[in-house]
Image (tube, rainbow, N blue to C red):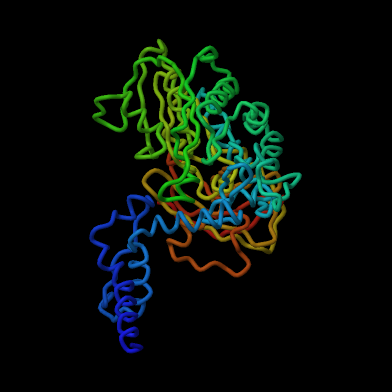
Amino acid sequence: MRKGFKIVYSFIFLIICALPLCLMPFVKNNAKIEKRELNKLPSFVSDGRLNIDFSSQFEAWFNDRIPFRSQLLSTANIIKGEALHTPTSNVIVGKDGWLFYESEGDDYMNTNALTDNQVSAIAVTLSLIEENITNKGGRFLFVPMPNKASVYGEYMPSSYEKADENNLTRVMDKVNELGVNYVDMNAVMTANKDKGVYHRRDSHWNYQGALIGYNAIMDGLGKEHKTYENAGYTKRKDWRGDLDKLLYPVGGFMDYQYYYDIDYDNFAFMTPARVTDNKAQLEIFMSDKELGDELIVTSNRQTGDDSSLYMVRDSFGRALLPFMIDNYANATFKRTDCPDVNSISGNCDLVYEIVERNLGRIIGTAPFMYAPLRENSFGEGEDTDENALAICDVLGYGIRIYGGIYDGAEIENGRVYVRLENESDTYTFEAFPIYEKELIEKRGEKLPDDITGKVGFSAILSNEYEWSGRYDLYIICGGKSYEAGSVDIK
């Protein structure tokens, strides 16, 4: 009897172990549910050698394809999130069914504070972009979108204590100090929070919040625009929030969305190309799927003018699409942190929208923009024994000079200048105060131990100056002049 029980027990155990393998060909692909690329089946041989990581890679491949994986994750997250209120799947489960990105907690408590140099660098970078745009006859507006936790902090878990200041408030103060044109979207959203301007289970504003934000943006630009103030709307509980998807790959809960009864002017998509139904394509961009929206270009000849818009945006900017398209003859929406400012034509408005949790990305990579020429008296500084690391790339579109200064350097007012001198000429350009970490690492450069990238510079010099010969290079900031070697430009 005991032997028979052991046989039956062993047989059931083997069936349970084999069941996932047997079901794998018949279950839905987890990639479609989780909206990510799954790990690939590894090979025993990699680069002509035995793959010593085969076991861990196979485990990752297998785990991604376990039948009912998404259902099991959803069940586990219900227990961990809704019942135990612990962060899970990069989501903070707040009060009354509110969800927040886990990274919002760092901004909320100011545990990810940027350095003073970084805050200054962000503000100066924006000021240089604004200078370029206004010199070309356009208007510039910086739109920092607050995290949901900054507007609806009362729904954050009690264990999170809100700081008196954080990156958003510090950047806003510095931007205001430098006179950069901006809209205080945190104040706008907070003043209208009782209307319900953010989703409960999505990290973004809803369409009602977007309409309020749109009017604030157009007012900030000083542009005449349609307000849609009397537009009716329908409120439907049919929106699947991005945070809800992270928490519950299968199942989950719907959120409310506001659908406005607005007859927009006829327009056409230039990018993507060959769109036959423009309104249907717009509905795809406006949905919760976020498909193929990296670059969108539209034309609207019903405006009766030649107005142009270039909007640097993240996922918040999608909800602004119909309003902006309806008010500009030509509009470009680029999902990026690194705008191509040189490509923006004259008399074009530039709106730079970015969410609070991503403010640091503004100085991740320098915008593609020619450095402005300054008088040689700019940035005069006393000589120092410290050197700067400077790399010079001679490219078809100009000279790119970038690098870093020793660890103890301070950027006075965030300004960094690149000076080139030879026997006959001296040129001084203002650089972006940005450390090009990715470019430097791609070149395989070995950084000196005392250069950490806390203070960097990046400048693209136009070929209009007809460079020729050898130039001594100096980097000037914080009242000091740093020797950076010499460069040959042919």
Q: Is residue 89 above or below residue 450?
A: above
Q: Residue at the right extreme? A: 164
Q: Residue at horizontal 57%, vertical 24%?
A: 212
Given residues 276 and 391, the one toward you in this image is: 276
Q: Is residue 384 above or below residue 327?
A: below
Given residues 7 and 18, the one toward you in this image is: 7
Q: Residue at the front extreme? A: 1
Q: Residue at horizontal 50%, vertical 49%?
A: 365
Q: Is residue 248 left or right of residue 92?
A: left
* Viewport quadrant of the N terminus: bottom left
Given residues 306 and 170, the one toward you in this image is: 170
Disc tally is: 0
Q: Residue at horizontal 46%, vertical 20%?
A: 260
Coordinates of residue 405 in the picture (x, y in percent): 62, 58
Whether residue 377 is visible = no
Q: Is residue 341 above or below residue 433?
A: above
Given residues 423 and 181, the one toward you in this image is: 181
Coordinates of residue 326 in the picture (x, y in percent): 43, 18
Q: Residue at the top extreme? A: 304
